[in-house]
Amino acid sequence: MSQQHPVRSTASPPSRPDASMSLLTNVMDHSLDDGYAEAAARRSAGSGKGLPRTLRAKLGLAAGLVLAAAVVTVGAAQAQISAPAIAKERQELIDRIEAENSSVDSLQKSVDRLRDDVGDRQREALLKHGGEKGRQLGLLAAATPVHGPGVKLVVNDAKKAESSGGGPRESSGFSDTGRVRDRDLQRVVNGLWESGAEAIAVNGQRLTALSAIRAAGDAILVDNKPLVPPYTVLAVGDGQRLATTFQDSADGQYLHVLQENYGIRTSISAQEEVRLPAAPSLIVRYAEPVAGGAGRSADDTGKGTS
């Protein structure tokens, strides 16, 4: 009887110790997702076909410069096209200004000529109807030119005022110094009258009893005629005595203060002869006595006379 060998079954391999940790093992073995890996591979493969980053930056800069140059060129072309029209308008405006200036000059010459003619006729009328009294009246009214001994007084702005070009003093004091004001010239003229001057002219402008010295902006006006510094004041009178009396007066001391403290330049000198023109225009006023005016005035006021 044969002995049957027992059948031995193949034993199964032993299980791995980390079999229960297959998910972690898979994550560690495949840390990069397949999609990311394929994308990185495609980028690496195509990098050799594109332009380098530096070259792309240079091309962009060049394109920007070309665009800027195109804009500048177009602007210059437009300006060149419009330049003739602007130049034409400017020339037309200049021509109009010059024409108007010429017209104003012509009218001013006509006014001056007529003013001189009226002045001459007034002087003739004074001499004709007044005789010696009319001659004296014409002298007092500045209707006739005069000459004789006198003084020459020059008043000029300070040097710093000429260099800076500043405006005249604005306050009543001397906070804004350097420029001669109208009130300064008024005091000079009044001081000369009080010192004994018989006739006065400022920069050739003869003063009368009705003359006005005032300011208009930066300019000083004498009888509405603008004057520019230096201001030369000529006065007829006893030269040396007139100069001394004026310098000792309150107005002369005022001018000395302007010179010492504020730089205004002044000079005064006696002259053997000065010549003053006649006033450019005269205002003629007539007065007539009223008959019985004294008695009626007394009756109207209710006051008697002794």
Image (spheres, rainbow, N blue to C red):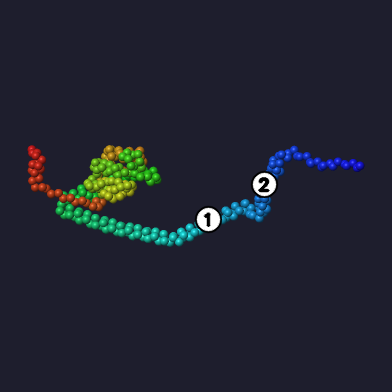
Is residue 272 in view from this perspective? no
Label 2, on which residue?
Answer: 33
Q: What secondary structure is marked by label 1?
A: helix
Mark-to-mark CA distance, 1 and 2: 48 Å
Residue 103 in percent (x, y) is at: 31, 59
Query: Image point 35% across, 59% down: which residue?
Result: 96
User: The disc labelled 1 sits on which kind of residue?
Assistant: Ala
Image quarter hosting the C terminus: top left
Residue 263 in percent (x, y) is at: 36, 41
Res. 21 image quadrant: top right
Res. 151 image quadrant: top left
Residue 68 - label: 1
Decide: is 271 above or below 117: above
Please tell me how crowded label 2 is: few (under 14), some (14-19), or many (20+) other residues with Cα within 10 Å: few
Is residue 297 in view from this perspective? yes
Decide: is 78 above or below 167: below
